[in-house]
Structure formats: structure tokens, C-alpha cells
Image (spheres, grey):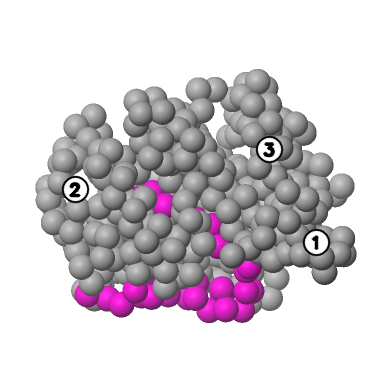
Amino acid sequence: MQSDAPAPTDTPERIAQPVRLFVCGDVMTGRGIDQILSTPSDPRLFEPYMSSALAYVELAERVSGPIPRGVDSRYIWGDAIEEWESLRPEARIINLETAVTTNHEADPSKQIHYRMHPANVACLTAARIDCCVLANNHVLDWGRPGLIETLKTLHAAGLRTAGAGSDRAEAAAPGVIEVPPIRLLVYGFGLSSSGVPRSWQATRQHCGVHWLADLSAATADDIGRQIAIDRRPGDLVVASIHWGGNWGYAIPQSEREFAHRLIDAGGCDLLHGHSSHHPKGIEIYRRKLILYGCGDLLSDYEGIGGYESFRPDLTLMYFPTLQAGSGELISLMMVPVRVHRFQLRKAAAEEGAWLAATMDRECHKLASRIVRRSGGRLALEWTD
């Protein structure tokens, strides 16, 4: 077991070593994707337009060709595995936008319900995910029993969670990832602007998500005080927030002010934003990284029309390197990918160029820029 205090050999120089992370936006392994995994759930859905999860597989096949069934646990990650092996992040964090449950009682207040069978949790461990953020608008799609089973399944598989729990205290507690000689503390937060209902808020008596009522300075200061209690010297802090709508590049001033306040008063080292179905602009504030919207990494939306101008099939894998101790950003490498046959594939040259140009346009508004690197990767540049 790790000691609460740094070992005697942990000098300030060791504690201040660079730490590379992997973060991404929404990972949705339910519905159509769940149907091609080894143990599919009951495909019945309660949506206005679809009655079976198999219909989403068929939609994807119409545009991409046959998709195999009963795939192994590594299939959905495709080319991402090679990138992880090459860039070797020391911690991997995702926003898991899926309930992991066999519960059949869908939340009647929701029209869309995402669910993955617990036997398919190996698709997350195969990717060596360290922490699943659960403060989002789909984790309670199958009710509170579904959330309890999700937590039990993920924890039994050795996965840490953040942003949801069996009560308020657990939902607010960070997921703790050991990156010797320091730790990475991951806090998850959900807001109504992304569709997280207030009724899903965790309480002393009920499980739920870590729900924020607003983006006020007082809320940020409250978070900062809790971080100060939890944090040890050298620790890095990630604030993972599900906020905003699905479409559009505009970043509300309230989100920018809240992100800045978390860094100023809360000691946040990386703000990990998600909910948007496409990547949004990136800001460096006081040498700290703010990802306002990471886009969907994995979903079963392949073949669904609408919003083509945003090219939601294209997205990014983010690999920030932070200085432990200070939390300052050293570098940010990004890998353009797309979903094809429910599998992550490297983006083609034209696709990567479009994504680079779009991101550069949006980052320019936030005093940063995107440059293309060898192998199709992208890098962030900024001025202090």
C-alpha cells in the first residue's frame, strides 16, 4: 500500500518531474457498440424513433460496410492502441457516457438511454483506462440501480471513478491515480447546461452525480477549498466538467470565468471539458491547460445524419504533458482520429488538415494556435 507521505527519497526534483496524460471527450460504449461486443445487452430501446440498439449498427453499416459481431475487447480502440504505446501516457482519463448495467428500468424522463453490459467492461480495461469520469447526462439513464451497478462493476475491474457515487461524499471525492512519486486527483462535475438533471444530484441518502448549481465564483471557491484539503505536495489536479450544448464553437464567458477562477483560487492544473460532439478551442491561462470541449471520442453515431458541417466523425486524442509540482503545461500533442465501423482509426491526411485548420481558427480566439507535426499529429503553441 502507498504511504500517505512521500518516501524519503522523493526529492523536490523528482516530485517536479514531467507527467504525460491521456484525456478525451465522451466515450459511449453502449447501444450499438454494446451490440457488437462479446456480451450484448437486451437491444430493446425506449426512444421515439428507434426501438432496437441493433438499428444503430445497421445505420453504420449502410455508410461504412459490414461491422463484425462478438469482437474482442481491443477492437473498438483500433489505432488508438498504437498511439498509446508510442506516446506512453502515465494516466488515462475518459468521460464514460454510458451506464454499465443489466437493469431494464430506463429513466422515463429521458428519451435516449445508453447502456453497456457489465460483462463488456473488459473493453475499458483492455485500453488500460485509469479513471472514468461519470458526472454526465447518461450515467443514470437506467436509474439509480443502474448507477450502483455501474460503480460496482467499474470498481471491481480496478477502474477509478470520479463525479458520481453512492452518496454525496463519494460523488464529490476525487479519483486518485498514483503516478509515483505523486498522485493525480480527478474531480468530476456535471451541469444542467449539458443536460444533467438536478434530480440526479447525489445526496447524503441517495447515489447520484456531483452536480453544480452554477458557475459562480463562490462555487469555484468551494471547490478550491476542498481541493486544498485533499491535495498533497506535488499532486496534480484535473477538474473534469460536463457542460454546455452538443453543437457550436462559441465558449460562454461564464465558462471562461469559471475555468480561470478554478485555476486562480482552486489550484486546478488541467480543466477537462466535455459534452460538445466536436472539439472546441483550447486556452492556456497562467500556464495551465483549459480544454473547453474535447468532442466525442467513441460513439455509435456513425451513419446518423445532421450537423455535417461540424464533421463530428472527426475528433482528437489529447496528450498533455504537465510539470508535476507546478502543474504548468509543458506541451500538448493531439492525434486526429475518426470512428469507422465502430472503431477508432487514424484520420486521413485531408481529414487531419481540416481538423487542424478548424482548431487553429478556434484556438486563435483564445491566443493559442495549432501546428501540424509529423505522422499527422497536431501540437498546441502559445505565448506566456
The amino acid type found where label 3 is placed reads Ile
Instruction: Specify start and end residues of the magenta stretch as a single range.
Output: 70-99
The mark lying in front, picked from 1 and 2, is 1
Which residue is nearer to you in this view: 311 or 77?
77
The amino acid type found where label 1 is placed reads Ile
Which residue is nearer to you in this view: 252 or 121?
121
Q: Determine the residue positioned at 77% across, 54% down.
A: 234
Q: Position of residue 225 (x, y in %)?
A: 68, 31
Residue on which disc 3 sits: 229
Residue 333 to residue 135: above or below: below
* Local crowd size for mark 3, using a 10 Å CA cut-off: few (<14), some (14–19), many (≥20): few
SS assignment at label 3: helix
Q: Position of residue 275 (x, y in %)?
A: 47, 42
SS assignment at label 2: loop
* Local crowd size for mark 1, using a 10 Å CA cut-off: few (<14), some (14–19), many (≥20): many
**Residue 94 magenta:** yes
